């Protein structure tokens, strides 16, 4: 049983590391691509119209929600909430034989 707990802890830690790697890869790509777009924007029209900000804003929204999910900043639907709901459903299942 102890080996199973260690294995579960390892798998959860590995999953967490994978989530962090994906977020930091997304952040790195964001910085590089938006910087490149800003440079292209500057070279083509000397900031007369800063169109690269549209891409930065759109991708930035996605990055913001990715950060909320990665760092568990959502107080309503974080990992603790998931664990509580799973336990609640399992207890209901044991008590009544089905989920409601």
Image (cartoon, rainbow, N blue to C red):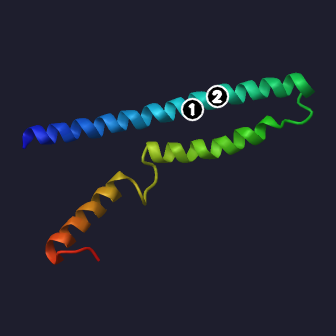
Labelled pair 2, 1 in contact (Cβ < 8 Å)? yes
Give the percent coordinates (x, y) of residue 89. 25, 67
Quadrant that contains the N terminus: top left
Residue under the point 29% across and 77% down: 100
Left or right of 13: which side holds 75? right
Residue under the point 23% across and 35% down: 10
Residue under the point 21% across and 72% down: 92
* Number of numbered discs on residues: 2
Numbered circle sitting on residue 27: 1
Residue 64 drawn above or below residue 96:
above
Left or right of 86: which side holds 1? left
Give the percent coordinates (x, y) of residue 25. 52, 29
Q: In terms of image quadrants, where is residue 27?
A: top right
Q: Nearer the viewer, residue 100 or 82?
A: 100
Using the numbered discs, state the Cα–Cα distance from disc 2 to disc 1 in whole angstroms.
Answer: 6 Å
Disc 2 target residue: 31
């Amino acid at each position: 049983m102890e080996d199973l707990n260690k294995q579960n802890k390892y798998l959860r830690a590995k999953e967490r590391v994978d989530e962090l790697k994906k977020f930091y890869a997304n952040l790195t790509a964001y910085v590089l691509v938006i910087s490149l777009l800003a440079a292209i924007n500057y070279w083509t029209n000397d900031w007369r119209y800063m169109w690269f900000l549209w891409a930065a804003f759109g991708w930035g929204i996605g990055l913001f929600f990715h950060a909320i999910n990665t760092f568990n900043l959502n107080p309503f639907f974080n990992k603790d909430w998931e664990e509580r709901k799973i336990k609640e459903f399992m207890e209901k299942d044991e008590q009544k034989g089905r989920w409601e």
